[in-house]
Amino acid sequence: MPEFVCRLGTPNGEVVTRNYEAEAMAELRTRLEREGYKIFSIAKPSDQGILSKNITLTKFSIDEFLIFNQQLSAMLRAGLPILQAIGILLNRQKASYFKGVLEDVERRIRGGTVLSEAFAAHSDIFPRLYTASILAGERSGDLDNVLLRYVAYTKTITELRRKLKKTLIYPVILITASIGLIILMTTYVIPKFATLYESSNNKLPWITEVVVGTATTIRENLFIIAPPLLIGLVAILIWRRTEQGRNKLDEWILKLPILGDLIRQHTTAQLCRSLATLLAGGITLLESFEIASESVTNRYLRNTTLAIIVKLRSGQAFTECLNESGWLPPLAIDMIGVGEKSGSLREMLDEVANFFDAELDVRITSLTALIEPVILVVMGTVVMTILLAMYLPILELMKGQSH
């Protein structure tokens, strides 16, 4: 179903930018008017103007995006108009996909579109959190500081992801090397020794018979075993792309003993940080939570956040809604509850995000430190078993000849 970017006036007088799905623009317009919204504009995200002209669709780097926002904030703080600041930054950009995006943004601003709406027209590129932050800065007249807060938020999230990747890369290399070594020995080394043993009439040790028999069975039946495995893997990947498959798989992942807790902690930290960034820009709690919930990548947890939004609209207390969701850590709910009662919700959300980011970092580092020796022991045991199975008959033959 097509998606549309809508700039609306809510019944309570707020101006918001939201994404809606509908069969046609006319149908969506009728539906929104019936719900009491004042419609300022409705556009398709794919309506990218200048981007349709010979632009290579490659994503730009996060560093390039952060530098742009830092420079834009500095220019706005210096008193430059938005259009002039965008023009200066555009001229400094090298030919790239990002430059094509900025050219389209500049064109839209020249046509009378506000900055937030110009970026929202590219919702397939820029996250809603970003466009909502810009909208909040436009409302409050504090756009430069809002951009700096968004840059700080993005840097924190990006640095955490880079640290997680760096922490996990060594175990992944070990596992990959182990699998590659086992495949090499099973398909090449063991068959060479098996040919040697077949030429002799000596009885083989049991461990050699097991290893050679296993390798021979796998090699001879590879074309029987491989197709069902590949078909099953492709079927799982296709099923995972469906809405039902993704929801079910995300639910199963959350039930895993260690990984499930890590995902909940990471989601809690990211949700709280996104929410704090939006609240700092002056956006209401309800709208901030609606936008922040889009940062939840686990579909099962995201569905629970939708229930929280419904309860918030009915006037229920924020902490009560979070508690009834059933997946946020009790400590996070207690800290948020204190912030809500004391009137420092935004500051407390930042504290919750920092706390769980730090705890997640410690747990992953500890887990990696535990996994690495386990992988080495398992890999060493497998290799030692194969080598022992291969050389034990040779040693016994040499021992027999010496006698």
Image (cartoon, rainbow, N blue to C red):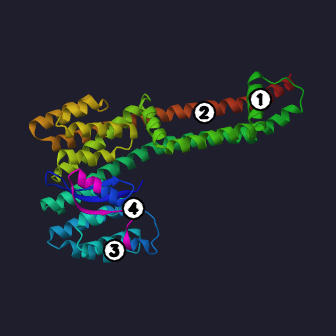
Q: Inspect this view and state whether residue 231 appears.
A: yes
Q: From mark 1 to mark 4, how far is it between C-alphas? A: 51 Å
Give the residue pinned by disc 4: 61
Mark sitting on residue 213? 1
The reply to whether the C-beta atoms of the residues labelled 3 and 4 are less than 8 Å apart is no
Give the residue pinned by disc 2: 380
The 10 Å Cα crowd at callout 1, few under 14, some 14 to 19, many 20 or more, is: some
Please name which of the two marks, 1 or 2, marks the residue nearer to the observer.
1
Q: Is residue 66 above or below residue 272?
A: below
Q: From mark 3 to mark 1, how far is it between C-alphas? A: 66 Å
For marks 3 and 1 on the same chain, the one whose residue lies earlier in the sequence:
3
- The amino acid at mark 1 is Gly
Relative side of 320 to 259, left or right: left
The 10 Å Cα crowd at callout 2, few under 14, some 14 to 19, many 20 or more, is: few
For marks 3 and 2 on the same chain, the one whose residue lies earlier in the sequence:
3
Q: From mark 4 to mark 2, how far is it between C-alphas? A: 40 Å
- The amino acid at mark 2 is Gly
